[in-house]
Amino acid sequence: MLLKIVESGSKYLSDISKPVTFSQLKQSNTQQLIDLMIATLRDKPGVGLAAPQVGELLRIIVIEDKKKYLEKVPQELLAAQGRKAVPLKVIVNPEIKIINKTEQFFFEGCLSVGGYRAIVPRATKVVVSGLDRNGEKISIDANGWLARILQHEVDHLNGRLYIEKMYPRSLLTEQHFSKNWAEATPEEIDKFVKHIRST
Ligand code: ZN
């Protein structure tokens, strides 16, 4: 069974999600929600999913960036993005701390805003602490692309979408992205960012 992903405009995407209590986390319905979130993320596929995106206002996120997702991205871009495969992570009640505010500018999309991408500035380095699905404390030091995914998913728990943080003039359709920007060099993206920021 897969879950339905709610889309931009849904109240779930603008509300603040509630922390999960320890006893709630141990309940079978919460564990089942986590399993279904993982299955839904893999089905799309995406690299991150937050519980409000499936209509549950709970502070749970799942992240996974598989090696095969990276195959179509040019090596040079992967290096600039600091993107590497990330094994499955389930983070409950994540708390994010920005460690390096220096921003990176790359295209980002969202399963709840289908069909579009835009350039979003994100901090380069973060630390996320929280619980795993068994209630054990975890802490994740993240740079580059993983730091971006974590900021995007934690934003969902606070009722924020990337469209509030993007450069509006960089918004483009998925089709246009695939054709013209999916294999762009970091320099080309940088040049585009400088252009839209200066004109
Ligand atoms: Zn999203």
Image (tube, helix red, strand yellow):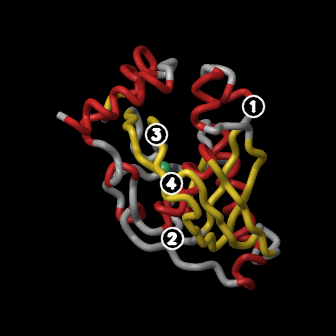
Residue at image mark 2: 57
The circle drawn on residue 42 is none
Nearer-N-terminus badge (3/2): 2
Residue at image mark 4: 123
Q: Considering depth in this image, is 135 or 24 the residue closer to the camera?
A: 135
Residue at image mark 1: 67
Amino acid residing under circle 2: Leu
Q: How far across and down, in percent of the image, does residue 161 sit?
A: 39, 55
Cβ of disc 1 within 8 Å of ligand 1?
no
Regarding mark 3 in the picture, which secondary structure is present there? strand
Residue at image mark 3: 108
Q: Considering depth in this image, is 44 or 108 the residue closer to the camera?
A: 108
Amino acid residing under circle 3: Glu
Classed neighbour count for the residue bearing mark 4: other residues with Cα under 10 Å, few (<14), some (14–19), many (≥20): some
The CA span between labels 2 and 4 is 25 Å
Q: How far across and down, in percent of the image, does residue 125 sit?
A: 60, 55
The CA span between labels 1 and 3 is 18 Å
Amino acid residing under circle 1: Lys
Which residue: 64% across, 39% down?
82
